[in-house]
């Protein structure tokens, strides 16, 4: 049976659109079936993977529209931390993909509800993070984990992040980076007006609740998109989502090397390791 792949390009990037055309011609020459964006809504559950050509924003958009399908990200943006293949290596990446030389890395998602009184105003899910965010003035958020009061946080708000989202806003706010395989979520206060700035890592099974206790402007933001304004007494409840975020991981992919290079996280750029390390997160041929 022929392999079936979806192909999606970032429309605002001409280089991504041009590369998508080349990729579709390459796949056709290798006897693969191709689904472009026009037909994806009808066939996506039957695909082996979707190839997303762009950056992290495109990958998250694809994952939201077509949950649970493995995604191979080809980076034509700047950082593109979720895009595990670079533009100049696209042909080698596709060769590994069509010959089953990859494995699927599965990450959790976040189910989020916004409750006001007895009404549910938002019922959604996130791949990266759920954020309660202030406008121009300090706000206060009460945090509860599994029904237990943790603290009241004055500041700019609160981030709840998945492992894949921990390298985004969470990391920028001083929160922890959770590597793939860590079964937990990061809860990070944003610019807290307190000398205590410690983030928490809670189990995936935890229920995380934030009660908004200010009268000032604030918003609920899901994966970077504002979805609702908040009022005093609003409850934001976050749990593990039913959907899975699935990334195609190719031979030679190395989280720590990508972390050092893409975020310029090199204390001594000239430093060399004193012993040999594996270059790949998984043996070649694993899936």
Image: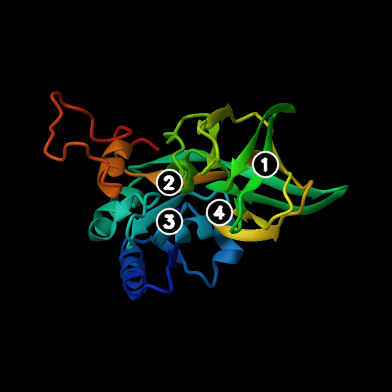
Residue wearing tag 4: 223
- Nearest to N terminus: mark 3 or mark 2: 3
Expressed as whole percent of the image width and height from the top left, the position of residue 66 reads 57, 56
- Badge 4 marks a residue whose secondary structure is loop
Q: Is residue 125 left or right of residue 46?
A: right
- Nearest to N terminus: mark 1 or mark 4: 1
Q: Nearer the viewer, mark 1 or mark 2?
A: 1
Residue wearing tag 3: 56
Expressed as whole percent of the image width and height from the top left, the position of residue 269 reads 16, 40
* Quadrant in the picture for the C terminus: top left
Of residues 257 and 143, the one nearer the viewer is 143
Expressed as whole percent of the image width and height from the top left, the position of residue 169 reads 47, 48
Vertical arrangement, residue 51 with respect to residue 37, above or below: above
Q: Residues within 10 Å of mark 3 (few under 14, many from 20)?
A: many
Residue wearing tag 2: 172
Q: Residues within 10 Å of mark 1 (few under 14, many from 20)?
A: many
- Badge 1 marks a residue whose secondary structure is strand
- Nearest to N terminus: mark 3 or mark 4: 3
Residue wearing tag 1: 141
Residue 137: quadrant of the picture: bottom right
Q: Nearer the viewer, mark 1 or mark 4?
A: 1
Q: Is residue 199 left or right of residue 146?
A: left
Q: Are marks 1 and 3 in contact (CB under 8 Å)?
A: no
Q: CA distance from mark 1 to mark 2?
A: 20 Å
């Amino acid at each position: 049976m022929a392999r079936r792949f979806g192909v999606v390009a970032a429309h605002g990037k001409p280089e991504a659109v041009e590369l998508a055309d080349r990729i579709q011609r390459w796949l056709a020459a290798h006897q693969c079936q191709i689904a472009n964006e026009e037909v994806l809504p009808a066939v996506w559950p039957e695909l082996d993977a979707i190839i997303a050509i762009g950056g992290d924003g495109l990958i998250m958009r694809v994952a939201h529209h077509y949950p649970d399908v493995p995604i191979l990200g080809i980076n034509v943006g700047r950082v593109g931390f979720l895009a595990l293949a670079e533009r100049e290596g696209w042909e080698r990446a596709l060769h590994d993909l069509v010959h089953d030389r990859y494995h699927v890395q599965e990450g959790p998602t976040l189910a989020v509800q916004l409750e006001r009184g007895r009404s549910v105003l938002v019922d959604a899910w996130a791949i990266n993070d759920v954020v309660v965010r202030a406008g121009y003035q300090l706000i206060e958020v009460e945090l509860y984990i599994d029904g237990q009061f943790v603290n009241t946080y004055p500041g700019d708000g609160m981030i709840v992040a998945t492992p894949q989202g921990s390298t985004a806003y969470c990391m920028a706010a001083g929160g922890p980076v959770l590597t793939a395989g860590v079964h937990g979520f990061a809860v990070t206060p944003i610019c807290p007006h307190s000398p205590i700035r410690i983030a928490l890592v809670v189990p995936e099974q935890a229920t995380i609740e934030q009660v908004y206790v200010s009268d000032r402007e604030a918003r609920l933001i899901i994966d970077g998109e504002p979805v609702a304004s908040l009022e005093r007494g609003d409850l934001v409840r976050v749990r593990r989502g039913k959907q899975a975020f699935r990334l195609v991981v190719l031979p030679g992919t190395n989280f720590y090397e990508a972390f050092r290079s893409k975020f310029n996280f090199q204390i001594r750029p000239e430093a060399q390791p004193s012993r040999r390390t594996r270059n790949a997160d998984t043996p070649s041929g694993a899936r």
